[in-house]
Amino acid sequence: MANILSVKSEDTWTEGKRCLDAGMVNSAANRIYYSVFQAVKGYAIHRGSWTMETTDRVHTDALKFVEQSGKLGRFYRSKMNELFSLRVLADYYPDTVIKKDLEELLADADSIRRHHISRCADKT
Amino acid sequence: MTLEALKTIVRTMLSGAFPCVTIQFDQIGDNPLHLGVSVYGVEPNAVRWLKDKILALDYDLCAGTDFALTPLVRDKETTAKFYPQFTSPWQAEAFGVSFASQLNMAFDVRLGWPSVLCPEQFEPAAWESSEAALMARVANQELALAA
């Protein structure tokens, strides 16, 4: 079975890139983070760890899932955590996310996202 | 490891390398064990290093546990613009409560206290004297590495 949230993740990623291109950096940080999060959530559902309704402590647990990516685990946890920090700043604090900070994370964020989509395919 | 122990380790490690910045802990999200490590008034060329240090501490101390540390690092310009009360560490101490909670935002639980870490201005806090001695030595090593 494919990652049930892969299409949603792709759509959210596209939204994030559009926001970034339009200079809406806070919105972009939110959308880019959630695009990755949706891919991880789909993976967590796929492996039976979460249901679609799971909401408790999901952002902490998402870090735990990405950390279980073999040799990439430490790197992925670090990058997703950094992306989460931008999303927290964007949504809950007065400061504005620095565009360069988000741009520098894009490639790694996409890698995490694709990895957790492909992990579902690997198990079928 | 307890939450207080985690905060003590983080505070000691960071204040060893950056003795004159304001550090405080915010709860982010619904997990009380997931701490936002807010650092204010950082020199621009040290922001990347500090973020990486917090991310490394997150992995080294929290991987495989229910704890997590997320960096929320602000340079001097951002601090002056949005958090003027944290431009000097002693002001954070006087402030006494989380800025986030004052704004009535989601992070309304203050889990820590601002670290006042300018040795030329203040006596060491009680927690620095005993159990943190080892960690202080480690922090000094980190400082040497940072230099």
Image (cartoon, grey):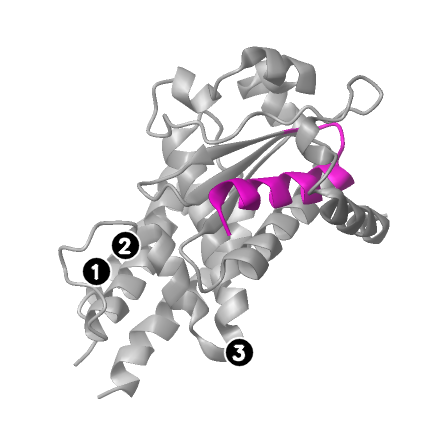
How many numbered callouts?
A: 3
Identify the residue under disc 1: A8
Which numbered tag is attached to residue B138?
none
Amino acid found under the numbered disc labelled 2? Thr
Q: Is most of the magenta stretch helix, strand or loop?
A: helix
Label 2, secondary structure: give it. Answer: helix
Magenta-colored span: B1-22
Amino acid found under the numbered disc labelled 1? Lys
Amino acid found under the numbered disc labelled 3? Lys
Expressed as whole percent of the image width and height from the top left, the position of residue A59 reads 34, 51
In front of the other: A31 or A119? A119
Residue A104 in the figure: left or right of residue A16: right
Decide: is A69 above or below B29.
Answer: below
- Mark 1 Cα-neighbour bin, 10 Å: few <14, some 14–19, many ≥20: some
Residue drawn at x 70%, y 42% as measured from the top left: B132
Which of marks 3 and 2 precedes in the sequence?
2
Label 3, secondary structure: give it. Answer: helix
Residue drawn at x 46%, y 51% as measured from the top left: B68
In front of the other: B91 or A4? B91
Contact (Cβ within 8 Å) of mark 2 with mark 1 = yes
Q: Chain of mark 2?
A: A
Which of marks 3 and 1 precedes in the sequence?
1
Identify the residue under disc 2: A12
Expressed as whole percent of the image width and height from the top left, the position of residue B47 reads 67, 41
Expressed as whole percent of the image width and height from the top left, the position of residue B86 reads 61, 19
Q: Nearer the viewer, mark 1 or mark 3?
A: 3
Identify the residue under disc 3: A71
Contact (Cβ within 8 Å) of mark 2 with mark 3 = no
Expressed as whole percent of the image width and height from the top left, the position of residue A115 reads 38, 74
In front of the other: A1 or B109? B109
Alpha-carbon span between mark 2 and mark 3: 27 Å
